[in-house]
Image (spheres, helix red, strand yellow):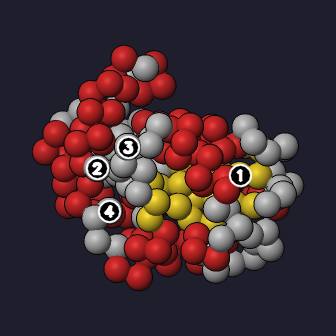
Amino acid sequence: MNAPFLLILTGPPGAGKTTVATLVAEYFTPSVVIEGDALWAHVVRGFIEPWEKDSDPQNRSLVRASLAAAARLTSSGYATVLSGHVGPSFLDIMRQELVGLRAPVRCVVLRPSLEECLAHCVERRSDPRHAGALGDETIIRHLYRTYSNLEAFERHVLDTSGLTTQEAASVVIEELESPRFALR
């Protein structure tokens, strides 16, 4: 697949989204990565943890902003990789924000085993890119369950259990043109 296109790369905490996104983007020219989850860190006042009961309006606004930025960059000719928690619960927002986008849109849910996610969440705390990363095992387990049974969206799942991030990126690149990951 040649640029431009939009790849939405999502999955539970510790799935490797940030690293895989960069590896995929490095394969294309021109390319850009948008770390959608970074927007949560920039809420100055009134922040609600994204898994809390009253967080839905905040979460939807931040996902909408990341999708709008991704659509704009894709329309400008970039191979765009949006990484973050942009799951099926935001499908309505995806459709609204991407309605005018003419480039191909793909969505891949990275899903390694829960044990691998937990281990990665502990390991990444030493990486400056993840200094404030989620480390609460109870919340990680809860968020992992939200990616466990995606029903019709299950075809977008890439089981990355046992794969390195480089191997996962290679599979994503190889299957970018697959109808399996087509969002529309």
Q: Earlier in the sequence, mark 3 or mark 1?
A: 1
User: What residue lies at 56% left-to-right and 65% top-to-bottom?
Assistant: 107
Give the CA separation, mark 4 to mark 2.
Answer: 11 Å
Residue under numbered circle 4: 147
Q: Residues within 10 Å of mark 3 (few under 14, many from 20)?
A: few
Q: Residue 38, can we see it?
A: no
Q: Amino acid at mark 2?
A: Ser
Q: Camera-side residue: 105 or 40?
A: 105
Query: Which is in the foreground here, disc 3 or disc 4?
Result: 3
Q: Secondary structure at mark 1?
A: strand
Quadrant placement of the C terminus? bottom right
Q: Earlier in the sequence, mark 3 or mark 4?
A: 4
Residue under numbered circle 1: 80
Judged left or right of residue 107, residue 130 is left
Contact between labelled residues 1 and 4, with CB atoms less than 8 Å apart: no
Q: Secondary structure at mark 4?
A: loop
Q: Residues within 10 Å of mark 2 (few under 14, many from 20)?
A: some
Q: Earlier in the sequence, mark 3 or mark 2?
A: 2
Query: Which is in the foreground here, disc 3 or disc 2?
Result: 3
Q: Residues within 10 Å of mark 1 (few under 14, many from 20)?
A: many
Asked where in the image residue 142 lies, by quadrant, the reply is bottom left
Q: Secondary structure at mark 3?
A: loop
User: What residue lies at 53% left-to-right and 61% top-to-bottom?
Assistant: 108
Q: Earlier in the sequence, mark 4 or mark 1?
A: 1
Residue under numbered circle 3: 162
Q: Amino acid at mark 4?
A: Tyr
Q: Is residue 55 above or below residue 20?
A: below
